[in-house]
Image (cartoon, grey):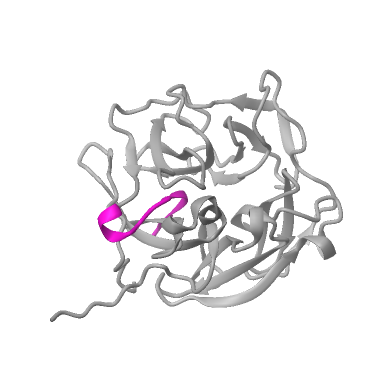
């Protein structure tokens, strides 16, 4: 007989589309998910969770309530992202979120909010030449090389634009559509930088599919062009463990170390695979190691039940 502790899922209940940051101000990690378990993704609020070690998480409560706080987008609270900025001697937090299939931004002095919406959507338009998809799933990225900040978004296409210094407006002249050309991009872009390379991760297929999964590309700049490896599938289902629908990830680097983790959602286990398409809004958040080979290629992630050990 053997015993083990399963640290996945890391949150109790239904959550999805996890974004994670390390807050220097608080010396903690903060997780920003979609509140899941609502029929046809009909949730209307966002929560956040804090942790000192990536394993033990505290619910910090609702940080943005769309019907109350976001009159221009009172429905479909999906797929947020957040960034910490030190402005002078103060820290500010910029929270980009999906509401009513538009991208908004809210601001706070604390990573656990409450956040105040700026009063209008940041992206409620489709890039020229893009005929389908949705304006959802934002990702914010600070380029450590140039010092610039970028916003990525898109379902069915991937767009990028440089954020202005105020972090609540964009320079439309920098807009670029950079959808991966291999035809696998669906949604959920995630961008990070390591050892001179920019990594672009995205989800393939529909979130209701057991085959929802993650692929990646690299680039020499935050706006591409993308170089797609021959074997770029890095996270997929593990039926032997009852794990399905692994996708819509973020990535976190342990502060000050070359130690990385991938944060993603999967179908509720063990019932999700029996729920049909309802599994696509009964999801749970997991964390596993993200590792690289000597050339910087991402080693395919094995989704686990055990998860990770506390930092």
123 and 259: which is toward the camera: 123
Asked if residue 248 lies in the magenta stretch, the reply is yes
77 and 196: which is toward the camera: 77
Residue 256 visible in this rendered orientation of the protein:
no
Residue 60 visible in this rendered orientation of the protein:
yes
Quadrant containing the N terminus in the rendered view:
bottom left
State the image coordinates of residue 168 (x, y, percent, origin top left). 74, 47
State the image coordinates of residue 93 (x, y, percent, origin top left). 66, 60
Residue 161 position (above or below residue 99): above
Quadrant containing the C terminus in the rendered view:
bottom left
Residue at 41 percent of width and 38 percent of height: 199
* Tag count: 0
Direction left: furthest residue: 1
State the image coordinates of residue 298 (x, y, percent, origin top left). 29, 42
Asked if residue 162 lies in the magenta stretch, the reply is no
Quadrant in the picture for residue 162: top right
Residue at 32 percent of width and 73 percent of height: 6
State the image coordinates of residue 190 (x, y, percent, origin top left). 49, 44
Residue 266 position (above or below residue 1): above
> Does 216 sit left or right of 86 as displayed?
left
Residue at 39 percent of width and 38 percent of height: 215
Which segment is the magenta one?
A: 239-254
Quadrant in the picture for residue 269: bottom left
């Amino acid at each position: 007989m053997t015993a083990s502790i399963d640290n996945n899922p890391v949150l109790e209940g239904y959550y999805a589309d996890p974004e994670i940051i390390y807050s220097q101000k608080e010396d903690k990690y903060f997780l920003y998910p979609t509140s899941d378990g609502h029929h046809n993704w009909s949730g209307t609020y966002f929560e956040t969770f804090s942790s000192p070690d990536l394993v033990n998480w505290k619910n910090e409560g609702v940080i943005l309530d769309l019907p109350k706080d976001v009159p221009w987008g009172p429905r479909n609270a999906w797929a947020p992202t957040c960034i910490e900025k030190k402005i002078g001697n103060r820290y500010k937090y910029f929270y980009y979120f999906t509401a009513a299939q538009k991208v908004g931004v809210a601001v706070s002095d604390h990573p656990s909010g409450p956040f105040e919406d700026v009063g209008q959507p940041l992206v409620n338009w489709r890039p020229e030449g893009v005929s389908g998809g949705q304006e959802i799933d934002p990702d914010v990225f600070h380029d450590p090389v140039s010092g610039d900040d970028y916003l990525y978004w898109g379902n069915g296409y991937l767009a990028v634009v440089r954020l202005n210094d105020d972090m609540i407006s964009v320079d439309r002249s920098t807009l670029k559509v950079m959808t991966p050309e291999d035809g696998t991009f669906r949604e959920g872009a995630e961008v990070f930088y390591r050892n001179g390379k920019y990594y672009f991760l995205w989800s393939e297929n529909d979130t209701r599919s057991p085959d929802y999964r993650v692929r990646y590309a690299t680039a020499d700049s935050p706006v591409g062009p993308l170089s797609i490896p021959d074997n770029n599938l890095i996270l997929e289902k593990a039926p032997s463990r009852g794990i399905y629908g692994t996708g819509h990830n973020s990535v976190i680097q342990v502060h000050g170390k070359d130690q990385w983790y991938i944060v993603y959602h999967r179908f509720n286990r063990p019932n999700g695979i029996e729920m049909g398409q309802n599994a696509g809004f009964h999801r749970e958040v997991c964390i596993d190691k993200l590792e690289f080979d000597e050339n910087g290629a991402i080693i395919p992630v094995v989704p686990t039940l055990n998860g990770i050990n506390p930092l």
